[in-house]
Amino acid sequence: MTVSRLSSLFIVGLLFTFSNVMAGDFKPLKGQTALRVCADAHNMPYSNDKLEGWDNKIAALIAEELGIPVEYYWFPQRIGFTRNTIKKVDPETGLFLCDLAMSMPASPGRLAKTQPYFSSIDTMVYRTGEGYDLNEMSDIAKVSKEQKKLTIGLFDRAIATETLLNDGLEDQIEYYQFMAGDARVYPGRIVEDELAQGKVDVAFLWGPIAGYYASQSDVPMKVVPLNELGQRYIFSFAMGVRHKDESWKDLLNEIMTKRKDDIAAIISEYNMPSLDNVAATAK
């Protein structure tokens, strides 16, 4: 056998191996030519149109296993999201606009859910280096009485609201609207803008959002998971598909099981608050 022939066989072998690695161990469903994801273009740390969110990276991982590209249909992830994305048919093609919605509550609902792939709890965030520490919600009243009256940034319907009111802090709360009319206005602004600029001294919001935006800020901040709330306030999130697409859900679960360590590693890059020592029940 000639050297030329050996070289050709070696190159073909490398290409075959490389293609197998890229395609992974799974095959797409019949007729599936792309992983079509419904996502929000301005929703970090989950997703954005620059593909910087953890869902963007996890979608790429799933597509890698299937050996197909990722395609996005962008729509704000708020009221009407499923109706206008994964459950909506394109009149021109007769196909649904997309086939996968990520970071959906794992509880039963309008979509069938995969196994959960992350869980979190609400958090308290404050600027560090100002002479006080906040480790529990009750510390706000203590610091306000003994050192400095703290202004609290709070989204409407926040879990922490009742506790703060019971602690007599109602006149120190600045309320913010969670969903503004402009879909580009994101919840993380309460950390990135209001807290960083000193308009509020402490803010309460959902763990993944707090962890991400605090880590991106030039102003040193501490994120305190509200593990004092108890385990009932830990919420898990999964991927959502249409209820009739059982085979698709099963395939996603298989991929997620195989790549669970990679998925966990991706999410860990975004400063997810710790769930260690969560109280069994609320105080």
Image: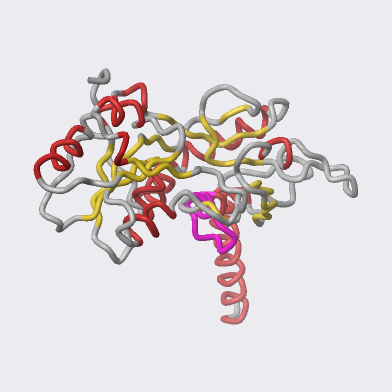
Q: Based on the displayed image, in which of its 4 quarters is residue 77 positioned? A: top right
Reply above or below: 83 against 209.
above
Query: Residue at horizontal 38%, vertical 30%?
Result: 159
Percent of width and height locating residue 106:
51, 28
Horizontal placement of 88 versus 255: left or right? right
Nearest the viewer among 188 and 249 is: 188
Colour treatment of the image:
secondary structure
Percent of width and height locating residue 124:
29, 42
Reply above or below: 140 against 194.
above
Nearest the viewer among 136 and 241 is: 136
Residues shaded magenta: 46-58
Q: Based on the displayed image, in which of its 4 quarters is residue 221 positioned? A: bottom left
Nearest the viewer among 263 and 192 is: 192
165 magenta-colored? no
Reply above or below: 12 against 251.
below
Query: Residue at horizontal 82%, vertical 40%?
Result: 89
Query: Residue at horizontal 65%, vertical 55%?
Result: 70
Percent of width and height locating residue 20:
58, 55
Count of picture labels: 0
Q: Residue furthest top?
A: 281
Query: Residue at horizontal 48%, vertical 53%?
Result: 44
Percent of width and height locating residue 270:
37, 53
